[in-house]
Image (cartoon, rainbow, N blue to C red):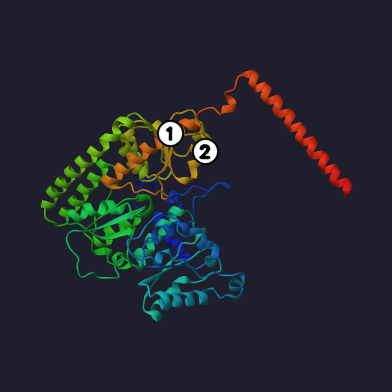
Amino acid sequence: MTSLSAKIQDVFDEPACDTNRGKDAKARKEGCSKPLTPGAAAGGCAFDGAKIVLQPITDVAHLVHAPLACEGNSWDNRGAVSSGPTLWRTSFTTDLTELDVVMGQGERKLFKAIREIKETYAPPAVFVYSTCVTALIGDDIEAVCKRAAEKFGLAVVPINAPGLAGSKNLGNKLAAEALLDHVIGTVEPDDAGPYDINILGEFNLSGEFWLVKPLLDRLGIRVRACIPGDARYIDVASAHRAQAAMLVCSSAMINLARKMEERWDIPFFEGSFYGITDTSEALRNIAELLVRKGADAEILDHTETLIAEQEAIAWRKLEAYRRRLQGKRVLLNTGGVKSWSVVHALMEIGMEIVGTSVKKSTVEDKERIKRILKDENRMFDQMAARDLYAMLSKHKADIMLSGGRTQFVALKAKTPWLDINQERQHPYAGYDGMVELVRQIDLAIHNPIWGQVREPAPWDCQPAGEDDLASTKNGTATVNAFNEFAGATAHRSGNR
């Protein structure tokens, strides 16, 4: 646990974070996580956060060293998808029992599990996750992984992020540290070029990155590694030879981007592929970073040509929805990069943002929102379910965009709702993704079901006289039915 404590303190002291730089030494050591509220949904532990970041590396065997419940709780917790390998969809766990814990069999069982995975699946690497139980009993997963790697001739990577270490966000960063310590830089590619980039913090939810990659392909830009979305182990291991990087989610992987810049001189910027303007700006920034690193300056002209072409196509498609959605009010109950990128995207087609959550947003995210909305009153850190319901039931918003946890608040308020978080079924990135997002919003708002559920029930529309008569008839029928039932019951009792 000593090495874990040191790693946590290192993660908390993040120079690339503006908020962190503004703290004194004592506050910096305490990190960014707020104390958990007893009885409330905690939003995931450090182990959960590490698994989220690493599981989309699709050809790796992800082995959870824990009782069965830890793997059951964390499996398939993101809507990431793969274009090839399916090994990441297989659950591997040492399934520790009480007897294993009491008899000290944890490390031996872990070693055997690694050997079985090697013999059965022959993956390029095995990621071994520590959990609360194995951390508390003192299993040394780093020593076991090192011995297994020597014995079996494959990469065995310890992910030391037990749930008791802290929040899900801390787990994200500890997973990034594991990649830096054990994976990135371990393979030297033989095809490195001046147009190689990394995309960090992109999860390829619902295949979103597949809408962006063709744009980069047309510019001759190769994605050396997308971490973690649809990644392969060898791509991540050779990611240190990229020329530039784009950081999509700074709250999760800013430490990875900053340290790769320090170690391998890979400059990065934070951007978004949500919305037409932000997608275009991201492409421009990628091209500019590559030119700064020595790529041919003609890529800048090619980028502008591509942007002009794609924007024209997207705006032409969006015109069909502009008239139907102009002035419609949107409430966003999300966070992180979506708190500003989706806001900007929707305002581009004339929709009004009545509020956006900034619970998981960085200081930079919040500054962007202020510039876009020009009204701090429409930003909220966290809104209780009852407040969301009150706002929606009073028709202060025409639709709510959020994750699955609050969908029933909107449905109870008889308000259209659209999933914008990781469980979503449609990709919303890039130019085509923006068109799809607007299409889904239009379908949700104009669904005829809302007109039906908002109509008063038929029994609430009867004249007063009819209500009284119906009430009397129903009351008489109920009394008669009860008397019949009571008589039949007494008769059966007498027969006994």
The answer to whether 200 appears left or right of 156 in the picture is left
Question: Which residue in the structure is indicated by mark 1?
Answer: 448
The answer to whether residue 349 is visible is no
Q: Secondary structure at mark 2?
A: helix
* Residue 340 spot, x, y in % from top left: 34, 40
Residue that appears at 33% across and 60% down: 230
* Residue 275 spot, x, y in % from top left: 29, 42
138 or 93, which lies in front? 93
121 or 135, which lies in front? 121
> Given the image, on which type of amino acid does mark 2 rest?
Ala
* Residue 284 spot, x, y in % from top left: 20, 47
Residue that appears at 23% across and 54% down: 214
Q: CA distance from mark 1 to mark 2?
A: 26 Å
Question: Which residue in the structure is indicated by mark 2?
Answer: 385
> Given the image, on which type of amino acid does mark 1 rest?
Pro
Residue that appears at 57% across and 75% down: 104
* Residue 320 spot, x, y in % from top left: 27, 35
Q: Secondary structure at mark 1?
A: loop
250 or 325, which lies in front? 325
Q: For mark 1, does the 10 Å Cα neighbourhood hold few (<14), some (14 to 19), or many (20 or more) residues?
A: few
483 or 430, which lies in front? 483
Q: Which mark is residue 102?
A: none
